[in-house]
Image (cartoon, rainbow, N blue to C red):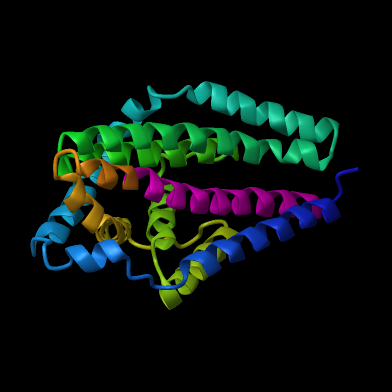
Amino acid sequence: FFTKDKWKKEWEALEKKEQSFLKKNIQEKESVLKQKLSDKIPDKLEDTLHAAFVKAFEMVFEHGTGIIEKTYRKGQHEQNYQENVSAVEQKKNRKNVKAFARQAGKSKTKNLLISGVEGAGLGILGIGVPDIPIFTAVLLKSIYEIALSYGFEYDTEEEQMFILGIIETSLLRSEKLILSNNWLNTEIDSDLPSMEDKNELLHRAAGQLAEALLYMKFLQGIPIVGVAGGLADSVYLKKITDYADLKYRRRFLRKKLSDESK
């Protein structure tokens, strides 16, 4: 039977994956591209990117979630989740419980392809900053689908703050990454009781995206050459959604362990 001990094995596997993510991303890396472009970046470009991401988040959270939901079948995701729950209840083995992660993985792969095509296409045209609303929409779509794969909604204030916390943390480095990851885990383990001010989280997440994508968005604004910059969209989308998968899986397993203890 798929006992509490087996759930603990899944938890231990998750912890290993999380430590692997932290180890891979904790070090500050000075890229060759950054070294070559540092004196060519306009002084106000990062501020422009920051403002563009803030506006994109606000637009989606206030008016755009319904539009994004038209790009995927929410009902099908919810049905898949319920079918996976039923399968675990009927036959409690590791293969069935991994179905939740497999479903999330399918969504991530599909959205990475969308992001890569979109970013490269706009890069050919030399479109950089105007790409941000599209990138933000694809990013949030990806996270929404991951959330649904593990049985969570995403359209309440609390869940939006959780998503912003995921985005910000996934792009941090050094001690800041460790501290923010620990904070998110505490929130998850306490069932999200005290998420911070939404506006502050929104600006912090936008700031991290602006900093991470600064050089690539500058490059993307150059016709033809911008293809390389546009492809960065999928690179950062993968990084953020890999981390989002870890956090939603943690919530999922925490709930299952809690239910088993009752």
Please tell me which residue is depicted at 44% across the width and 73% down the height of the picture. 27
Q: Nearer the viewer, residue 170 or 201?
A: 170
> Residue 182 at what x, y percent from top left?
53, 70
- State which region is magenta: 233-262
Q: Residue at x 84, y 30 (%)?
A: 90
Query: Main SS of the magenta segment?
Result: helix
Q: Position of residue 217 (x, y in %)?
A: 21, 50
Query: Looking at this view, is 66 or 47 the one in front?
Result: 47
In this rendering, the count of numbered labels is: 0
| Residue 126 to residue 253: above or below | above
Give the quarter of the figure containing the N terminus. Answer: top right
Q: Residue at x 40, y 48 (%)?
A: 235
Residue 257 among magenta residues: yes
* The stretch drawn in magenta includes residue 159: no
Q: Is residue 191 left or right of residue 111?
A: right
> In the picture provided, is 119 more to the left or to the right than 93?
left
Along the line of sight, which residue is nearer the eye, 137 or 111? Answer: 111
Q: Is residue 59 visible?
A: no
> Residue 149: percent from the left, percent from the top?
58, 36
Residue ranking furthest to the right: 1
**Residue 211 on image: x %, y %:** 26, 61
Measured along the vertical axis of the image, is residue 76 above or below residue 9? above
The reply to whether residue 123 is in sight is yes
Does residue 20 lie above or below 101 as drawn? Answer: below
Say which residue appears at 41% left-offset and 58% top-offset.
165
Give the vertical position of 123 relative to 259 (above or below): above
Residue with the most extreme bottom position:
175
The quarter holding residue 228 reads: top left
